[in-house]
Image: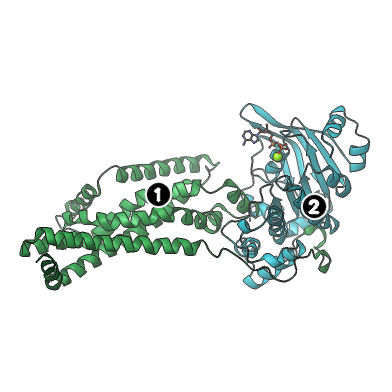
Amino acid sequence: MTNDALQTSTIENQQAVCPIIKVEHLGKTFGSHVVLKDIDFEVDRGDVTCIIGSSGSGKSTLLRCINLFETPDSGRVLFHGEDIVHTKNPDKYRQKVGMVFQSFNLFNNYSVLKNCTIGLTTVLHIGKEEARARAMKYLSFVGMDGYIKARPKQLSGGQKQRVAIARALAMEPEVILFDEPTSALDPEMVGEVLSVMRTMAESGLTMLVVTHEMGFARDVANKVVFMDGGVIVEEGAPEEIFNHPKEERTKAFLAGGNK
Amino acid sequence: MFFERIGSILQNYYPHILRGVGYTMLVALVGTLVGLVIGLLIGVFRTIPTPRNKALKVCKKIADGILSAYVEIFRCTPMMVQAMVIFWGFALLNDGRTLDVTFSALVIVSINTGAYMAEIVRGGIISIDNGQFEGAHAIGMSHTKTMLYVVIPQALRNILPSVSNEFVINIKDTSVLNVIGFMELFFQAKDIVRSNYLTFETYLLVAAIYFVLTYSITLLLRFVEKKMDGKKDYQVQGSQNMDAESYAIEEGGRRHDQ
Ligand SMILES: Nc1ncnc2c1ncn2[C@@H]1O[C@H](COP(=O)(O)OP(=O)(O)OP(=O)(O)O)[C@@H](O)[C@H]1O
Ligand SMILES: [Mg+2]
């Protein structure tokens, strides 16, 4: 093991003092286009943080930097106090940081059940039986245990997203990142996915959610981050952000885009 | 009578013909499979993300260059010429002793097919949506595991028509290996004609045999394609209701298996 932050023992020691994820002065540029500027924020254990902001403000890029799908140009991403931007083993880190995508990204070549067990058996090296039991536990949590034999292409969008959530949960990560998990769904399917996420939040999971669902952010999040033009304009409790925004840009965004 | 003559060829020369069919199919099958493996290895290697480390980056560049050279050289020269160059090239290096002809034939068809397969596999991998890669990386799969469990199975399904096409081409193209004395079907036909002088009848018969071989392979692989697509329907089992209270997610969602 190359990265101490990923060792359980180290995690135990640092847990009391460190947030799970801390982003410091993060910057990201695509070509000459500055997408993220000096981003600072942290995710504590049990936090449900919602990131809101208009299209193109850099929300997805921020999540992708945290997940190391993009390499930040400047600043640090700390996982339990350890900088992981240049870690030699991003795969090990990603086992502990789940991700749910707008476009689901279920494995087309596997059944619903195999989608949830493949990571357990091949990445975590858990035995077949145990993997199956664990996958079933999370599939029943999202209400998809009846569909274990189905292929992704046979499911509706909402069902796919619930399976994708079960897949992420089955890895039992320390935090799950969501990038607009309901944006690709028909309105009647949004509810079923949000309800699953709400239950996850209530059971104490640490979640970082990019969303346009203001109702969800208001009711479920304990912290809301408003981004615009690649910077964090304002962050705070949902009550503060939604009812008493301090910044003009936040007010304008909420007045325009509030659902 | 025409048909009697065909019948007599079959009767008198069936051992030749069977041996020819056997050699042809052996080389076509092994060549296609080994070629596919070569193509997969090259395809996977080429898609490894560029390493950050400078030295590794240079190594990868050089290896990529060598692989491209291999692919282009074998794609852009006739297999008949490749066969002569490789077969007699080995002989030259070994004081005139030639390699076993069947072994040479297997090697030549394999590396020739490998060059085509590398391109086919590359196309197959490119056709897989980036979301499949990201979905796999997001649960901590390495590049190799992502390829092995997620990308290659889907790419294989997509390229199966091209692979069976290569197989069919190989069945026909092994005939050029008669130049190194490989005793495949066409070589046998030449042999038969030398003793019976029934040139037209013999080659017509051999053409029909080639057709039967290639067409039955085509049908067989189409059947495999259908099989790979799996069942069209599935069964819903048990309850479909949300069942959130039946257990609690461990606090904080932390792993607890260690
Ligand atoms: N790979 C890339 N290459 C170049 N530019 C990119 C890339 N990814 C994102 N961008 C640019 O970065 C900016 C921020 O994109 P990002 O996807 O992070 O926005 P977002 O806040 O998630 O928007 P949305 O709400 O539409 O999803 C956009 O202007 C986009 O064009
Ligand atoms: Mg986005």
Callout 2: chain: A
Question: Is residue B183 visible from the viewing direction of this image?
Answer: no
* A154 lies left or right of A233: left
In terms of image quadrants, where is residue B28?
bottom left
- Considering the image in quadrants, where does the C terminus of chain A appear? top right
- Residue type at mark 1 is Ala
Disc number lying in front (2 or 1): 2
In the rendered view, tell whether residue B27 sits above or below residue A157. below
Alpha-carbon neighbours of circle 1 within 10 Å: few (<14), some, or many (≥20)? Answer: many
Ligand 2, image quadrant it occupies: top right
- Considering the image in quadrants, where does the N terminus of chain A appear? bottom right
In the rendered view, tell whether residue B58 sits above or below residue A114. above
Question: Is residue B106 visible from the viewing direction of this image?
Answer: yes
Task: Give the colour chain B carries in the figure.
Answer: green
* A6 lies left or right of B229: right
* Picture residue at 14% right of the left edge, 55% below the top: B96
- Residue type at mark 2 is Gly
Is disc 2 placed on a helix, strand or loop? helix
Callout 1: chain: B
Mark 2 and ligand 1: say if the CB distance to the nearest ligand atom is below 8 Å: no
* Picture residue at 49% right of the left edge, 43% below the top: B56
Look at mark 1 in the image and give the residue it sits on.
Answer: B118
Look at mark 2 in the image and give the residue it sits on.
Answer: A191
> Any mark on residue A236, and which?
none
Q: How many marks?
A: 2
Is disc 1 placed on a helix, strand or loop? helix
Q: Nearer the viewer, residue B155 or A6?
A: B155
Coordinates of residue B139 in the picture (x, y in percent):
65, 55
Q: Could you give the CA–CA distance between mark 2 and mark 1, rounded to whole angstroms? A: 46 Å
